[in-house]
Image (cartoon, rainbow, N blue to C red):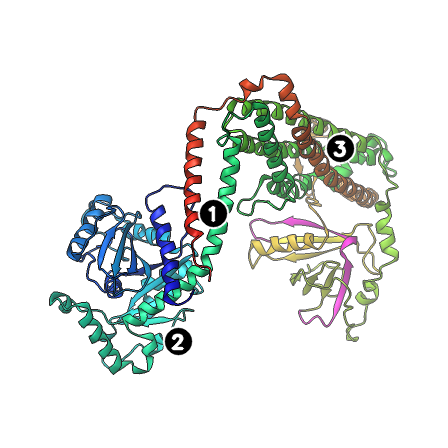
Amino acid sequence: MAGNEGMKELVEVINRLQDCFAYTSSSLNLQLPMIAVVGGQSAGKSSVLEAVAGRDFLPRGTGIVTRRPLILQMIPHTEEYVEFLHQPGTKYTDFEAVRKEIQEATDKEAPDKAISSRPINLRLYSPYVLQLTLVDLPGLTKNPVNDQPNNIEQLIRDVILEYIEPENTLILAVTPATEDLANSDALKLARQVDPAGERTIGVLTKLDLMDQGTDAREILENKVIPLRRGYIGVKNRSQADITNAINMKAARDAEDAFFSDNYKNLKDRVGTRVLQRVLNQQLEQHIREKLPGIRSNMIQKKNNLTEQLQILGAFDTKAQSNNALFHQVMVRFANSMKLCLEGFDYNVNINEVQLGAVINETINEEIINGLLNEENLMPTKEETMITIRNLFGVANYISPPQQAFRRMVEHMTKKFQEPIKISVEIIAEHAARAVEKFASQELGPFPKLKQEVLTRVMERLKRNELSCKELLITYIEAECAFMNTNHPMMKRSDALATSDHSGIEEGKMNNSPAGSPARTPRHTIGTQRIHQGYLHFPNYSVFSWKKKRVWFAITPVHLIVYKDIREDTELMRLNNAEIRIGVKNDRKSGLKRFTINRIDGRPFGKGQARDFEAIYDGKEGKEIGEEWESKFQEGGILMENFGSANSIFFDEQFLDVYEDQAKSRYRPRPWSIIQPHKIDFARKFESDKTLNKDADCFLEKILLYMRIVRQTIQDLTPKYIVLKLINKLLVYISEELTAEIQDRTDLDTIMERGGDEEMKMRALLSELQKIEEILKIMDNWPSA
């Protein structure tokens, strides 16, 4: 089948489908191929439509005339008449009567100059038209008239977008040649839904009204704002022509004469007859591309409806047995839960994020990297020093006892109990939401069964939640019962200290004589940059490049310090796994101080410096400093907040007792943070070099061990949660729930339908009937 005959059959299919859905409120969301006409009030949109139709029949006047979409189906025929879908069997041969009927139908649906998206469907049978279907949309406007609402512009845009957003719609954007194309309202609106110009056809009107000496050749040649389907220029009747009743044939002859005189080299891009032919060809091609997909979509919808109606027993000559129906809906419920939580199915939802994906995101972001990664879960130097001193009591300090290590680890490990409980509760809430959603979706027609399922599943979920909490708390108790200080990771830092294969010997570099040749940085695996930029060294830096801004580069493996941005002199290269960075903030100035030292306590280079500081001065904004902190962490560096090195935390009750004993010597404030320059007792702690040195080393070991504990908890917690809350729940639903309900309830009672089920069944049957009607129409579409 070829030529215009093929086009005729194609458009007839679309016309019948449009008629089928013109006055239904079906949820099928059928998006049919069509051409929607968009333009401003003064763009000549209605004149273009009448020129293509060859008849003067649209309402005219001032203000917004087209206030409802008008679906115009043009059908070649030996006779000439018009039929309205809302008046079947009535033929209009008087086009003035057609205009009047359009106006009355508009006022009836949208009185008082209101706007409606409900279309008027009419068919024009004529020997002077090609097979086409066009949708005339309200003209774009900005100012309300009479009693129209102030947001009339937005209301019109909403109606237009409703018709031009679907991918199956071609957009005919009408623009006067007398205005700048860049300011075209029609093209602007088209670009919102078709930014690449793939399905937009440009139409230029009023070419005869352009200023003398100007023309629209570049636009018609598609050089200004390119559209894949190009532009067509037309010359419509003027207002004087309409007033003088110049007929369409005479208007077309005048149009041809104008373009022969002015655009003779662009005959294939100008004229109403060219526009008719182009629209005919474009619509034919568009329909051929889209109809197979529409048909496939309808078949899928039919299958889904059929399945729903089978569950409701709509196709049985006798009532489906409650036993069979019960097992059928329970299997659907179990499968829906499994698909949501486990995924891995060909029929996975591609339009909505399921709760299984939400749970995964919650586990990774809110639990592992959130609740179980808080700073307060790791020990500070202050806590370590106080623990050591308190364990000695009145005795003089000698060395940190084993009890201090055990006490600190036990104290810090128990801090994880509350975050673990909260984590379990969060995932349990998500699982409960999934149960409620799919119980309503699959068991909704049977309210008693739905309630029974919800009661039993929620009870099991609560039991699993308590069991999961008990299991994880038992693990915390096990961590406190035996501290594996021989863990392989405890010796990792020592191994790194003797086998630094990828770094540079910092001692040699730091002590290079002035003016010696710069060493070329060693480029190894993992040198891709995570972050880089300048940081300051403070004036008390022990290194030779003190009081300088130096260039830092963070890679997945190393923290590298260069003399400047040229990176021709490498000052230091540290393994990310060996170091930790303490962060101190000054919120007012935005200053952020990073204290860098080795996890194993080794000094840097040959000197005795065990740490150095890099400072972000806050001049570029607080967010830049926060970015440095996050990028250090992204590189795998241990980030800790050690508090202020110049403050010790005490219990207020202790201060009160001590103050009574030594009022003449100490003047502590009734405040839990004691400043060293005012509290001699705090200075005594700080001045105890042996205690400080041992506390530093001791803290390193505790931190290293606690990192092992935290990593294990972060790894095990989601495993236990998924096992107890997800997997066990799915096993219960799939293997135990159905048998429990069947053994302990009366199926005839529990399978009673709700009061809305009969209405729901009728609605689904009506929808199925509509789909079958659509498919029957599509079975006749020309495939060749």
Indicate left or right for 750 with 664 as reference: left
Asked if residue 666 can be seen in this view, the reply is no
| Numbered-mark total | 3
Q: Residues within 10 Å of mark 3 (few under 14, many from 20)?
A: some
Indicate left or right for 286 with 92 as reference: right
Q: Compare residues 715 and 308 and report the one nearer the observer.
A: 308
Indicate left or right for 21 with 597 as reference: left
Q: In which quarter of the image is residue 216?
A: bottom left
Q: How crowded is mark 2: few (under 14 residues within 10 Å), some or many (20 or more)?
A: few
Magenta stretch, residue numbers:
565-591
Above or below — where is 598 with respect to 286? above
Q: Please tell me the numbered disc located at residue 766.
A: none
Q: Position of residue 764 (x, y in %)?
A: 44, 36
| Of callouts 1 and 3, the N-terminal one | 1
Residue kind at label 1, given as amino acid type: Met
The label nearer to you, 1 versus 3, is: 1
